[in-house]
Image (tube, rainbow, N blue to C red):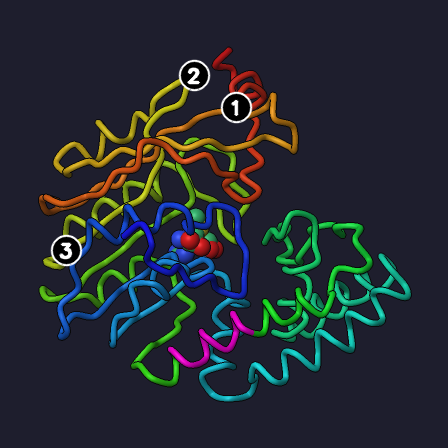
Amino acid sequence: MKNEKIFVPPFKIQGIKTKLLPLIKSAITIENDMTWIEPFMGSAVVGLNIAAQKAVFADLNPHIINFYNSLKLRKITAKMVREFLQDEGAILAEKGEEHYYHIRTRFNTNHNPLDFLFLNRSCFNGMIRFNKTNNFNVPYCHKSQRFSKAYITKIVNQVAHFEQKILQNDWQFLCQSFEKTIAMASENDFIYCDPPYIGRHVDYFDSWDEQQEQKLKNSLFGTTAKFMLSTWDKNKYRSNPYIKLFWNDCSKINHEHFYFVGAQEKNRNSMTEALLTNYTVSNAKIPKSSNYEQINFEFDELKYLVDNGFK
Ligand SMILES: C[S@@+](CC[C@H](N)C(=O)[O-])C[C@H]1O[C@@H](n2cnc3c(N)ncnc32)[C@H](O)[C@@H]1O
């Protein structure tokens, strides 16, 4: 597992599970006839690496779904991505932030999937964040030489790998809420859920609260498929109360990792993640701890506690 290659998808997103993949993979067995069901696909890094022959990927964010459906339908190819990033990257190098904001306005008007990729790979910290009117609102990363030859090649290779997997397999991409996706599962299938983390500030396409967590619980306990749910367990300030409240009947695997608030080392905090399953995991390979920056997990725990009257 340690040396197994991890494929990185073309999009970045806060909460991406790249570094937890070895653990997640070690706790999942996929049989040939199973459908992989991922109701909160985000970047899709988990499903991409599980690489099941049949898969349903879904998310409420229509732009991610649109990008992957465009790849599937060959409206976008890796070659087109290269040409697009070369052209727009050259203008960015010349005009800097003016061009970034030009593409952002264009994307918020036309929703072109190539613009979405451009923004995701040149915005501040590689985030996906939309405001109340569903406009992408992440500021510029202030690196006008962002799209170097090597960076473009890296992104193009990520797109090409995803493209190849889509064409080789039977993968569906659906823009819908998790209830519908979970309802598609049958006994033989496997559901992996990675919703926005409850009780922590989130800024995804959709918000997440207790009502949503309750609905998720009802959906997952109503399925006959196997499931795994990623959530947070505890940090130095508090524990996730919903684990006991809602998920007590699940098996739990813990893993500690470090995340950063902002860029400074002194702001490093550790947090324990939990993987909850409705089956017993016998071979989970739990690394001691991983020292990684969970991308853009810009969550200031103390500020949250003060703002919400906990401190
Ligand atoms: C933590 S991210 C998933 C990250 C993903 N596992 C990865 O590694 O890239 C959560 C995702 O859930 C999506 N989401 C939020 N509410 C949703 C809902 N009600 N139904 C489906 N997707 C939702 C967000 O758009 C976001 O992409």
Neighbour class for label 2 at 10 Å: few (<14), some, many (≥20)?
few
Q: How much space separates mark 1 and mark 3, taking CA atoms? A: 33 Å
Neighbour class for label 3 at 10 Å: few (<14), some, many (≥20)?
some
Judge whether 267 appears above or below 254 on screen: above
Q: Residue at x 66, y 79 (%)?
A: 82
> Which amino acid type is marked by label 1?
Glu
Query: Residue 192's x, y, as percent?
Result: 27, 55
> Which amino acid type is marked by label 2?
Tyr
**Mark positioned earlier in the residue sequence (3 or 2):** 3
Q: Is residue 229 left or right of residue 18?
A: left
Depth check, front residue: 96 or 23: 23
Magenta stretch: residue 246 in it?
A: no
Q: Is residue 143 left or right of residue 98?
A: left
**Mark positioned earlier in the residue sequence (1 or 3):** 3
Label 2–label 1 contact, CB within 8 A: yes
Which residue sits furthest top? Answer: 311
Would you say the magenta stretch is mainly helix, strand or loop? helix
Residue picked out by circle 3: 226
Judge whether 96 appears above or below 149 on screen: above
> Which amino acid type is marked by label 3?
Lys
Q: Residue at x 46, y 34 (%)?
A: 291
**Mark positioned earlier in the residue sequence (2 or 1):** 2
Range drawn in magenta: 157-165
Q: Does ligand 1 reach within 8 Å of label 2's beta carbon?
A: no
Depth check, front residue: 143 or 15: 143
Query: Residue 74's x, y, as percent?
Result: 51, 89
Label 1–label 3 contact, CB within 8 A: no
Mark 2, secondary structure of its residue: loop
Residue picked out by circle 1: 301
Q: How much space separates mark 2 and mark 1, taking CA atoms? A: 8 Å
Q: Which mark is residue 237?
A: 2
